Image (cartoon, rainbow, N blue to C red):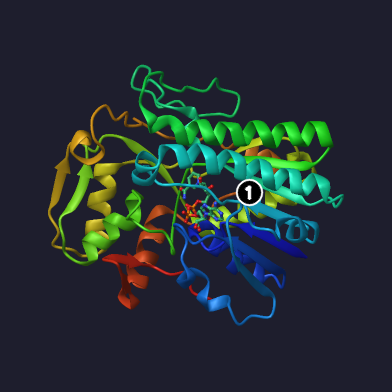
């Protein structure tokens, strides 16, 4: 089986590479290394089943050829991370929207029938109100919320919503097997804290006995899925006939507040770090809308694939702490690289 992964030198992408090589598949990665890193794919570079091209999904001339040989395509290449999204509001829209369309157009023109997974995000659910203290699970049929105004914070969700619309339109109009998946928070080896991802940031801070910085009062919740589970869920969806033309949540439904997460990481790392709160304005600038909670409904994923997560958050954090003993320091960011074994 031939697999093409755009954004394959990134966090989720490099874990997908590892998963597919272990299955004996041939894997081709296209990545411009903007947030991805060569270190993430270093362990695979001498594998004869692995091929890497450094290029931009918007302009790389080999895209049509790469697409025409693939049985499964994961389109992950995107501008990601809250800090980066706020800093590059135009790139987020331009790259995320046009990159996805170019990939799907190339697949349609190839006359091959690849299974395509397009990465969307739980960000499309927006900032949901908490009703009577209840965190209602977010299911795929809900109306989506984009807060109006001049804030470019929502550009990422707008771009991901456009990706979903392209995925569904190509599936319907050209009878293609395209599935849009809404990732909730995924964490594990290869993820970097520097663009705003909370788990690697807390682990870095805790293992180095630095101050753990919680944004806001820490009552906001997230649901974290181990990337080893995430890659299996993605492949299961690619392998399921009924997932064509569907939008599916991929995540864990076990919720934790960010303050509890900070305390948990501190405890598991046996760390002396103190926990400090930083105001949202201080971190992100004026008018930032923080998401109050995130909890996916997973019935659709389970019905389509029978998928169940294997790893709990404690397993993931312990795994990251273990890996951090063999840490690489890159630009002051601890890199927990995805190893081959
Ligand atoms: N990690 C999460 O929790 C999460 C949550 C929601 C959605 N997602 C989505 O999943 C996908 C993968 O995210 P990730 O967490 O692995 O992030 P990541 O930054 O590690 O991966 C994105 C990859 O895309 C590459 N890239 C960016 N622009 C490109 C371009 N124009 N051409 C080629 N490559 C390009 C980057 O270099 C990087 O390797 C993204 O589409 C992201 O929006 C992730």
- The residue depicted at 69 percent of the width and 37 percent of the height is 167
Residue 296 lies, with reference to residue 40, above or below; the image says above
Quarter assignment of residue 231: bottom right
The answer to whether 298 appears left or right of 34 in the picture is right
Q: Is residue 297 visible?
A: no
User: Residue 228 location, x and y as percent?
Assistant: 53, 60
Task: Pick the residue in front: 300 or 80.
Answer: 80
The answer to whether 99 appears left or right of 327 in the picture is right
Residue 11 lies, with reference to residue 197, above or below; the image says below
Q: Is residue 132 visible?
A: yes
- The residue depicted at 18 percent of the width and 36 percent of the height is 279
The answer to whether 150 appears left or right of 12 in the picture is left
Quarter assignment of residue 177: top right
Residue that carries the numbered disc 1 in the rendered image: 307
Residue 327 lies, with reference to residue 120, above or below; the image says below
At mark 1, the secondary structure is: loop
User: Residue 268 location, x and y as percent?
Assistant: 27, 61
Please rate how many residues cluster around mark 1, counting C-alpha atoms within 10 Å: few if below 14, some from 14 to 19, many from 20. many
- The residue depicted at 46 percent of the width and 57 percent of the height is 34
User: Residue 191 location, x and y as percent?
Assistant: 41, 59
Of all residues, the one furthest to the right in this rendering is 111
Residue 213 lies, with reference to residue 268, above or below; the image says above
């Amino acid at each position: 089986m031939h697999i093409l992964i755009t954004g394959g030198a990134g966090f989720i992408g490099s874990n997908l590479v590892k998963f597919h090589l272990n299955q004996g598949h041939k894997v081709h990665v296209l990545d411009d290394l903007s947030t991805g890193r060569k270190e993430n794919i270093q362990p695979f570079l001498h594998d004869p089943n692995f091929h890497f091209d450094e290029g931009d999904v918007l302009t790389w001339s080999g895209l049509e050829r790469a697409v025409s040989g693939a049985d499964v395509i994961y389109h992950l290449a995107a501008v990601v991370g809250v800090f980066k999204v706020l800093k590059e509001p135009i790139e987020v829209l331009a790259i995320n929207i046009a990159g996805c369309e170019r990939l799907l157009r190339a697949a349609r023109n190839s006359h091959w029938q690849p299974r395509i997974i397009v990465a969307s995000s739980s960000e499309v659910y927006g900032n949901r109100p908490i009703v009577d203290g209840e965190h209602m699970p977010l299911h795929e049929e809900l109306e989506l919320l984009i807060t109006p105004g001049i804030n470019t914070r929502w550009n990422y969700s707008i771009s991901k919503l456009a990706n979903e619309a392209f995925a569904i339109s190509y599936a319907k109009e050209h009878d293609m097997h395209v599935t849009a998946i809404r990732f909730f928070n995924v964490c594990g080896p290869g993820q970097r804290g520097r663009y705003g991802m909370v788990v690697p940031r807390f682990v870095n801070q805790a293992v180095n006995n630095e101050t753990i910085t919680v944004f806001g009062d820490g009552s906001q919740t997230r649901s974290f899925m181990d990337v080893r589970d995430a890659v299996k869920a993605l492949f299961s969806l690619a392998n399921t006939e009924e997932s064509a033309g569907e939008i599916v949540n991929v995540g864990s439904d076990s919720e934790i507040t960010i303050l509890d997460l900070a305390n948990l990481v501190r405890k598991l790392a046996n760390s002396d770090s103190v926990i400090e709160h930083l105001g949202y304005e201080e971190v992100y600038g004026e008018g930032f809308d923080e998401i109050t909670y995130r909890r996916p409904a997973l019935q659709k994923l389970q019905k389509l694939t029978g998928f169940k997560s294997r790893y709990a958050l404690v397993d993931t954090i312990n795994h990251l702490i273990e890996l951090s003993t063999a840490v690489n320091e890159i630009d002051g960011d601890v890199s927990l690289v995805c190893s081959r074994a």
